[in-house]
Image (tube, rainbow, N blue to C red):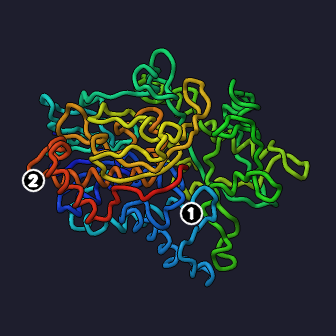
Amino acid sequence: MMREMQADIVILGGGTGGTAAALAAAKSGKTVIMTEETSWIGGQLTSQAVPPDEHPWIESFGCTRSYRQFRDGVRQYYRDHFPMTPAARAVCNLNPGSGTVSRLCHEPRAALAVLHQMLAPYVHSGRVRILYHTAVTKAEVQGDHVESVTVKQLDTGDHIALHAPYFIDATELGDLLPLAGIEYVTGAESIAQTGEPHAVDGEPLPQDMQGFTYCYAVDYFEDEDHTIAKPDMYDFWRQYKPDFWPDRLLSLRAVKPSTNEPIDYEIFPGYGRFSLFQYRQILNPDHFAEGAFASPVSLVNWPQNDYWLGSIIDVPQEKVERHLYEAKQLSLSLLYWLQTEAPRPDGKQGYPGLRLRPDVVGTEDGLAMYPYIRESRRILAEFTVLEQHVATDARPSGVAETFFDSVGIGCYRIDLHPSTGNRPYIDISSLPFQIPLGSLIPKRVRNVLAASKNIGVTHITNGCYRLHPVEWNIGEAAGYLLGYCLDHNALPTEVRNDEEKLANFQQRLVNEGIELQWPSLRPV
């Protein structure tokens, strides 16, 4: 017999947005069931192993109070549990890894610990229940209302029917949307559809979406040999050269995203080029007592291991499995190439001292638990954010579009990685932007919200709405919105389209430390 479970809110997907939604809903006094495919909540912060991508003002403003508590918690986690040097301990805005991608580069396990701490009161009380190793398989729908969602426990094969007045799709790929018949789009829209300057000419390309990446962690010991076994697809990936790439993918020559002009990298810093190892370095031994760590640790999410030979959305399962396998083989082939063939400044080849660190990402094979997903199915929303709303070149005023229904803010360049349509980077300047509530609400279905990369954005604007603090804000707003809806017996669309209800809800967000608008700032 199928098990059944009930809550006020069911959150499908325990990633960055889902975790923030669970926290907000629990703070609102609601019971929550949250599912998660892996054994780690946190998504791109943890199971996908991506240090936070953030805007230049993050240390002072431009994120929610709870996201700042998370960031502060990561720093405090190191201070409380690690043998830090007095100098490092005294740094208020500590960057544990000293990586250059972010002002807060940290290990995924540290992020996981802090997320567990933040949810602990609600998990311990039973208000939040997390179902790990669980995937969505079915939805029961009556008209414009989702009645229940069935999930499968991947370890046992058991099924559980989840019932709630409201559901949040915070899965990485928008898994609920096709199962519940919720209208959505994928891939690249056409100029005829959106009028966006960087949309595609001609017909839309629903299977043309950004590549995904299997990230992994490495450290380095110059006098040791940690060379992995030669990957099965190494010969293929060693020779692979994209049409839009200046050299083979497995090389130190790539392209500058903003111009697609050739650029040469170096692995370790010190020779005047951009250092890949330092870019996403997540642990710096200099911050800790002598002997605590023998080497820095870096997270490999580089241009050379983005996978774009096919999508894993709306294709047969055998293709999904093939693309996931090939993406893993690409990441392992990059490591093997780095260990055996990468050119060195001293004239030698290869860095056999690079050591794969499975413990850092919590897996046996050393690759992250889940691929880093940049693009999802996207709901047909009450409001869709277009390039014209946020791109610097499209806004002569120098200010992004003002949204009356703002539920938060974000800032990042419109950053699209090479796509499954064999198209290069699209990396263009954008303005600090708002998150419109209408982008979280499907046009038709009444009791579902989007809370990840599946909101009402386009292929283009997904490029700036997909980053860590923005996804967190989206999920947090969704959690608070459904708490408000349950308290006031109102549907999400009614809150958005009723002036008094919207004002009351936005005031609640402000009271909870969610910023709804930016001061005057420069583009990024």
Callout 2, which amino acid? Answer: His
**496 vs 45: above or below:** above
SS class, disc 1: loop
User: What is the distance, in whole Å, between disc 1 and disc 2 at their CAs?
Assistant: 40 Å
Q: In the figure, is residue 426 to the left or right of 158?
A: right
Q: Dot 1, how many residues are within 10 Å of its Cα: few (below 14), some (14-19), or many (20+)?
A: many
Residue 47 shows in the view: no
- Hey, what amino acid is under mark 1? Arg
Q: Quadrant of residue 466?
A: top left
Residue 144 versus residue 408 in the image, above or below: above
Disc on res. 37: none
Would you say the residues marked 1 and 2 are in contact, meaning their CB atoms lie under 8 Å apart?
Answer: no
Numbered mark located on residue 103 in the image: 1
Residue that extends furthest to the front in the rendered view of this protein: 397
Residue at image location 42% in from the left, 66% down from the top: 68
Q: Name the residue under label 2.
A: 488
Q: Is mark 2 on a helix, strand or loop?
A: helix
In the figure, is residue 402 to the left or right of 227?
Answer: left
